[in-house]
Image (cartoon, rainbow, N blue to C red):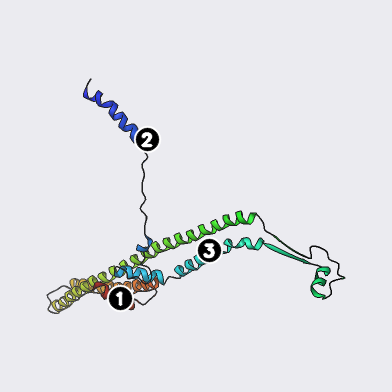
Amino acid sequence: MSQQNYLLPFRCLVFATMLTTPIFIHAQQFDYNTIVAPEGQRPASFEDYLVQLAYLNSPETKILAYEKTIEEKEVELQRYEWQDDLKFGFNINEVSLANVLEKDKSDNLILYPLYQLSSSVSLGSFTNNKRKRGIEEIDVLVKDMENNQHKMKIRAETLARYQKLLLAIETLKMRTKAEEDARNTHQVSQQRFKNADLEMEDMLRASESYTNAQEKRLNAETDIQLAIIAMEEMIGVKWESAKRAEERFKK
């Protein structure tokens, strides 16, 4: 028997074992507190601080908190709703009333029972209310998941806007440098043109390049202001106020 034929039964056994052995994939449990630092906890970085500001100052965050509170109160109401079906009855008649009010009870006709107390409750209250409470409890969990999804969106949008602001700042630096170079070239071109050392066409090109560089620098400054407005809309405070905290995180 060849070596391959000898190993064939062993290979078949291994393959069959792989087919019959369940493969468990353990999903990583994500801690949503790492997306947004909880209130009162110091964020790990300036970027996380901006995300925390955006989350805490977001009206949607407060709306979700109110909605969750409503759902929790609904759960509490369902817990005691069976009491609404619990009814008590008290029966009193003129004979029993006379036995209470009159001092001389010798001539009173006594009919039993003098007082009648009854109560009733629906059996469905103990089963249906439990199911309703279970639904309300799931609604509370849904609100938690909506809040977690809100955290992820807040973080993504805040960091995206912050990166756009950083890009606008760096772009302005480059535009400013390009404008300085274009201005120097323009000044040299003017001097050379006065000295009849440069053609009119070349001098006009240098002038146009300088004008374009000025326009691009102005656009870059505008992009920074727009990015700051977008950041302030996100974090709910003035950018200057948030920026002061950056030095503390660098230290």
Residue 189 vs residue 228, the one in the foreground:
228
154 sits left or right of 192 in the view:
right
According to the picture, the residue beneath numbered tag 3 turns out to be: 71
78 sits left or right of 246 in the view:
right
| x and y percentages locating residue 126 in the rendered image | 61, 56
Instruction: Give me the residue at 55% from left, 64% from top.
Output: 76
**Image: 39 above or below 119:** below
Q: Tag 2: Cα neighbours inside 10 Å, few (<14), some, or many (≥20)?
A: few
According to the picture, the residue beneath numbered tag 2 turns out to be: 20
For badge 1, the amino acid type reads Lys
**How many numbered dots are placed on residues in this image?**
3
For badge 3, the amino acid type reads Glu
**Image: 175 above or below 119:** below
User: Of label 1 and label 2, which has the lower sequence position?
Assistant: 2
Residue 8 vs residue 123, the one in the foreground:
123
The numbered disc on residue 139 is: none
**Image: 204 above or below 25:** below
User: Of label 2 and label 3, which has the lower sequence position?
Assistant: 2
Name the image quarter holding the N terminus.
top left
Between the residue at mark 3 and the residue at mark 1, the CA separation in whole angstroms equals 38 Å
190 sits left or right of 247 in the view:
left
Between the residue at mark 1 and the residue at mark 2, the CA separation in whole angstroms equals 59 Å
Q: Tag 3: Cα neighbours inside 10 Å, few (<14), some, or many (≥20)?
A: many
Residue 131 vs residue 28, the one in the foreground:
131
Name the image quarter holding the C terminus.
bottom left
Give residue 250's quadrant in the image: bottom left
